[in-house]
Image: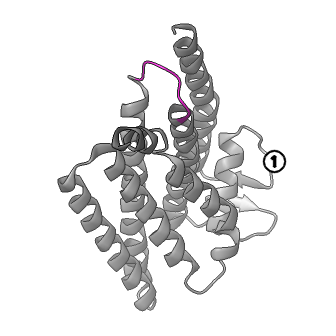
Amino acid sequence: MKFRQLIQATENKYNRLLANLLSLYIIYPFLVYLPLGDWLIFFFFSLSLIIAVYQIDRSKLALRFNIGLFLIALLLRAFSTIIPIYSDFNRWFELSSTLIFLAFIGLCVYSILLELIPAEQVTSDIIKGGICVYFLLGFFWAAAYNIVQIFDPDSFSSAAKTVNQADLLHFSFTTLATVGYGDIVPASKVARVLANLEGMTGVLYPAVFIARLVSLHNGR
């Protein structure tokens, strides 16, 4: 019975992460307008990634390191909220926190791919892990766009004139899916390069991932 439970736990490794990513993506536009919405998003998203990485690596040292980074990022966000008078400090606090957020996402993507690439057969866990990576890529590029906008508020143009984090997330996923509605347009050179790179990622990743699944299925 214990062995069967262990197999089920391994098979459903990415259930919680996938559910959290999907839930955060759906409620993100509503939470971002709340007074502490940005804090809630950062807290639950980072916590989900820490749990996911630990569930994959099972390393207590990595867990302590990630929790330490998480607390530092949380403290930096607190400073950016408490000290809004000094705009320069506020910008650097927000930048540092977002960079740590990017590191969290990058580490999680790396850990998942490190497990998916050597897989020898197609399982539901492999498929769910690949979907998690796709969602994480969308959040990763949205955070990268946020960094660009911190340095240059005019990096993106929109009919609404102001572009917030919810708009950047929308732009990220439409670019990743290569839909391109045109409601938000990258205006600066750096933003255009990042958008092009994300568009190429959105084309290549599903093609490579699906090709990998097909080759695993045919190799059975």
Q: Is residue 122 magenta?
A: yes
Q: In the shown orientation, is residue 203 left or right of residue 83? A: right
Q: In the shown orientation, is residue 121 left or right of residue 193? A: left
The residue sitting at the top extreme is 219
x and y percentages locating residue 51 in the rendered image: 38, 57
Which residue in the structure is indicated by mark 1? 181
Occupied quadrant, residue 127: top right
For disc 1, the neighbor class at 10 Å (few under 14, some 14 to 19, many from 20) is few
Location of residue 165 with respect to 216 vertically, above or below: below
For the point 52% across and 9% down, the residue is 220
Location of residue 77 with respect to 27 vertically, above or below: below
In this figure, what is the number of numbered marks? 1
User: Which of 45/9 is in front?
Assistant: 9
Occupied quadrant, residue 184: bottom right
Location of residue 197 with respect to 34 vertically, above or below: above
Q: Which residues are magenta?
A: 119-124
Q: Is residue 103 magenta?
A: no
Q: Amino acid at mark 1?
A: Tyr
User: Which of 59/94 is in front?
Assistant: 59
Q: What is the secondary structure assignment of the residue under circle 1?
A: loop
Question: Does the rendering let one see residue 73?
Answer: yes
Q: Quadrant of the N terminus?
A: top left
Magenta region, main secondary structure: loop
Occupied quadrant, residue 161: bottom right
x and y percentages locating residue 106 in the rendered image: 40, 47
User: Which of 198/43 is in front?
Assistant: 43
For the point 29% across and 44% down, the residue is 57
x and y percentages locating residue 103 in the rendered image: 36, 53
